[in-house]
Amino acid sequence: MKKLKIISFSLFLLASLGCGKNENQDYQSNLDKAVRNIHNSLQKELKTSIPSLSVYVVSPKGTLFSTITGANGTVINENTYFRFASNTKNFTSTAILKMMQDGWLHLDDEITEMIPGTNIPYTPDGADWNFPNKSQITIRQLLQHNAGVYDITNDASKYNINGQTYTEYMLDNFPDHQFSTSEYVKILTKNSLTYGAPNTVYHYSNTGYSILSEIISRIYSQKAGMNKTYSNYMYDYIVGPGTKVPLKIKFPELASDKQLPAPYVKGLIKYDSHDEFTNLKNTSAHIGEGNGIGTMKMLSEYIRSIMKAENVLNASSVKLMRTNKGPATTPEQHNYSLGCFYIPGVGYGHNGATEGYLSMMLYDPETDFSVVVLMPFWDLRNNMKDFPKCINTLNAAAAEAKKVVGY
């Protein structure tokens, strides 16, 4: 069976939205029609069946769910589990901002500085952690992808093994390997890998968010007086039963913890030679940047409550999340701020791509409109020529959903 490649994308279609409002229109019928048309159009363009396309909308106009199932798909609903990949970055940003609110860290501290109230640095100070520009990098810059941290997971241009990224190679050859941030950072150090000095270049970096997960773990361990992990903090302070908006979202960290909760949808990858359904995944390679598991309804509840300052973040922190872009970030580089991007006219949030799964969550504060889009499909044929069309389908579905409900 052909092994899978790990890919994270943050590609955005800046859609132009139509205006107008018809109080008498059948929003559900219009949404169903739009989802069906987008799904059919993509199938025709790619000349293949697509398992499903689903859209979940919440707004003052009501709550709507629409899904279309292809010939090779299974019926899903808003409570079906899937891997939401880089949407995890927004949760990591929430965790960092929550720690900031609680006085546990300062965004503009360099990551070599001490955790407030301790003599322990935010990141380990051993030789393996002496990666390029480390002493100049701040927590804020990591959130903004302005830290210059080379992406071990996605980028094979400066470091690779037989043409694969380190993560791809290890997953292909050692699928049960327990990954760690320290092993990623050791590669950065040993090979002097960097995109440049902080605030001089924007470059999307999963490895930068892996470092943030290490920082969260180290701070929480100091506050708890015992070893704690990124997932421990997420459960205790962000999504667990004792939090303000409890959600059964999971952030698995063990290489052995591969199975999705039921009910779940499998992702489909279409290769030149064969099709492959996937749901099992070693997420230890993506802690803090892409290891989240949840449902469309859960993501909707999360993004709405966070962006409305009705969850763990106050209004000031939410404003930072939405608007605090680094100096190296330009509109052409997706309006990225603190684990959050903006699609004009649609909303704030994030997207995610991991083996066979594509998803997006967005919220618009001006209209109180939120949308979650899920398409469990990757087209990797023809050297991935059509993969961007799959990504852009998420953007098109989100924009069209907002239009058809009258915004």
Image (cartoon, helix red, strand yellow):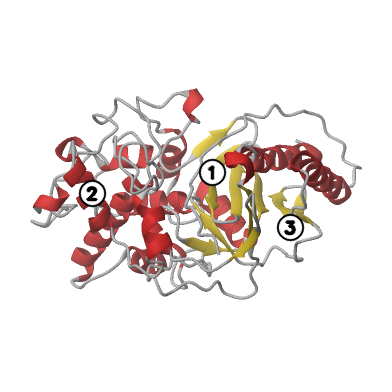
Most foreground residue, 33 or 244: 33
Q: Position of residue 93 (x, y in %)?
A: 39, 48
Please report contact status of discs 1 and 2: CB closer than 8 Å, yes or no: no
Q: Position of residue 308 (x, y in %)?
A: 54, 47
**Vertical comparison of 230 with 353: above or below:** below
Which of the labelled discs sits on residue 187, or is there none? 2
Q: Position of residue 166 (x, y in %)?
A: 34, 51
Q: Disc 1 and disc 2: Cα gap in Å?
A: 31 Å
Q: Which residue is mark 1?
A: 349
Most foreground residue, 104 or 330: 330
Residue type beneath disc 2: Ile
Please report contact status of discs 2 and 3: CB closer than 8 Å, yes or no: no
**Vertical comparison of 21 with 111: above or below:** above
Mark nearer the N terminus (1 vs 2): 2
Q: Is residue 217 visible?
A: yes
Number of other residues with Cα within 10 Å of mark 2, as a class: few under 14, some 14 to 19, many 20 or more: some
**399 sits left or right of 356 in the view:** right
Q: Nearer the viewer, mark 1 or mark 2?
A: 2
Q: Secondary structure at mark 1?
A: strand
Q: Quadrant of residue 328?
A: top left
Q: Position of residue 305 (x, y in %)?
A: 54, 53
Number of other residues with Cα within 10 Å of mark 1, as a class: few under 14, some 14 to 19, many 20 or more: many
Residue at the image point whose x is 61% and y is 67% from the top: 81
Residue at the image point whose x is 24% and y is 54% from the top: 104
Q: Disc 2 and disc 3: Cα gap in Å?
A: 38 Å
Which of the labelled discs sits on residue 124, or is there none? none
Residue at the image point whose x is 29% and y is 28% from the top: 199
Residue type beneath disc 1: Gly
Q: Which residue is mark 3?
A: 51
Mark nearer the N terminus (3 vs 1): 3
